[in-house]
């Protein structure tokens, strides 16, 4: 399903849950990180208080080295669709990975055709509501896996990305236009201590439980 429709469905579920009416914390694993960020930007009521992104790809990916999951048939299908063309309309609307596929060598096509990532990152029309809603978070925590072999580039887990037109140079969040021009309010959030960049040794989602308790749960969720 298109990621935007998934987020609309989740928004409706959150609104209908009386246990969440006063606010809630969210923890997103892998692509769940950027999906929950989109939820914070699009669905501010009830309020998301703390967003913990565990290996989320906030500037997308460019590469599919290890297919997530254990279903070989689905993985083969995903690869074939990406090979067909990540920015083909059918692929964009039916393959979630294509919806955050950020090709540094085809930035014009990406911005024109991306149905999800380019939108939530305010890369075309600057949606002030997205910016306002994201800044309502108390904390936005991004966890990067230092030995990640699935996410390319792994710096995307800290909002980094390949430099436009190159796969040789990676820009940190602070060197991107998104940050310098504050498209999403991340510069303002960083200035007030709401952004947190954590790193843990390990491959994708191979997080040590005690590290997670000490650095995330005890600090942001208690």
Image (cartoon, rainbow, N blue to C red):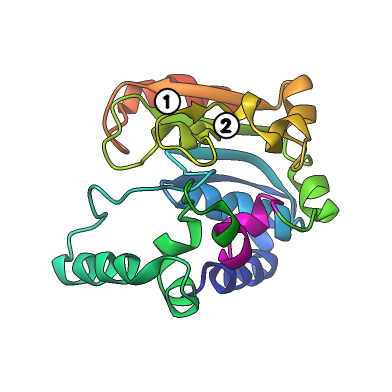
The residue closer to the viewer here, 7 or 117, is: 117
- In the image, which disc is placed on residue 187? none
Residue 88: x %, y % from top left: 46, 74
Q: Residue at x 24, y 47 (%)?
A: 65
Instruction: Give above or below for 210 relative to 72.
Output: above
Q: Which residue is mark 1?
A: 213
Q: Is residue 9 visible?
A: yes
Position of residue 67 measured from the top left corner of the image (x, y, whole percent):
24, 55
For this orientation, the residue located farthest to the left is 72
Vertical arrangement, residue 182 with respect to residue 80, above or below: above
Q: Are marks 1 and 2 in contact (CB under 8 Å)?
A: no
User: Is residue 165 or residue 155 the one in the foreground?
Assistant: 165
In the drawing, does residue 186 fall left or right of residue 212?
right
Residue 114 included in the magenta stretch of the image:
yes
- The reply, left or right, for residue 106 in relation to residue 64 is right
Q: Label 2 belongs to which residue? A: 141
Magenta range? 110-123
Residue 158 sits above or below residue 117 on the image: above
Residue 39 in sight from this viewpoint: no
Image location of residue 42, percent across then percent down: 72, 60
The local secondary structure at tag 2 comes to: strand
- Measure the alpha-carbon separation of dots 1 and 2: 14 Å
Q: Which residue lies at the image location 80% right of the left edge and 53% below the top edge?
A: 126
Residue 85 lies, with reference to residue 167, above or below; the image says below
- Asked if residue 141 is among those painted magenta in the image, a careful observer would answer no
């Amino acid at each position: 399903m298109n990621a935007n429709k998934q987020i609309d469905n989740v928004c409706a579920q959150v609104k209908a849950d009386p246990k969440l009416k006063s606010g809630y914390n969210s923890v997103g694993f892998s692509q769940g990180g950027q999906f929950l960020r989109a939820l914070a930007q699009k669905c501010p009521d009830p309020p998301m208080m703390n967003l913990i992104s565990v290996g989320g790809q906030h500037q997308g990916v460019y590469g599919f080295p290890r297919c997530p999951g254990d279903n070989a048939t689905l993985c083969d299908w995903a690869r074939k669709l990406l090979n067909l063309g990540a920015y083909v309309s059918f692929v964009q609307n039916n393959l979630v990975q294509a919806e955050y596929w950020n090709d540094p060598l085809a930035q014009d096509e990406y911005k024109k055709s991306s149905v999800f990532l380019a939108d939530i990152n305010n890369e075309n029309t600057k949606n002030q509501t997205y910016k306002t809603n994201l800044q309502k978070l108390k904390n936005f925590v991004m966890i990067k896996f230092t030995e990640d072999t699935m996410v390319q580039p792994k710096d995307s887990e800290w909002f980094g990305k390949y430099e436009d037109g190159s796969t040789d140079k990676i820009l940190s969040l602070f060197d991107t236009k998104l940050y310098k021009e504050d498209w999403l309010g991340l510069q303002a959030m960083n200035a007030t201590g709401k952004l947190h960049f954590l790193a843990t040794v390990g491959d994708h989602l191979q997080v040590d439980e005690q590290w997670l308790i000490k650095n995330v749960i005890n600090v942001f969720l208690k």
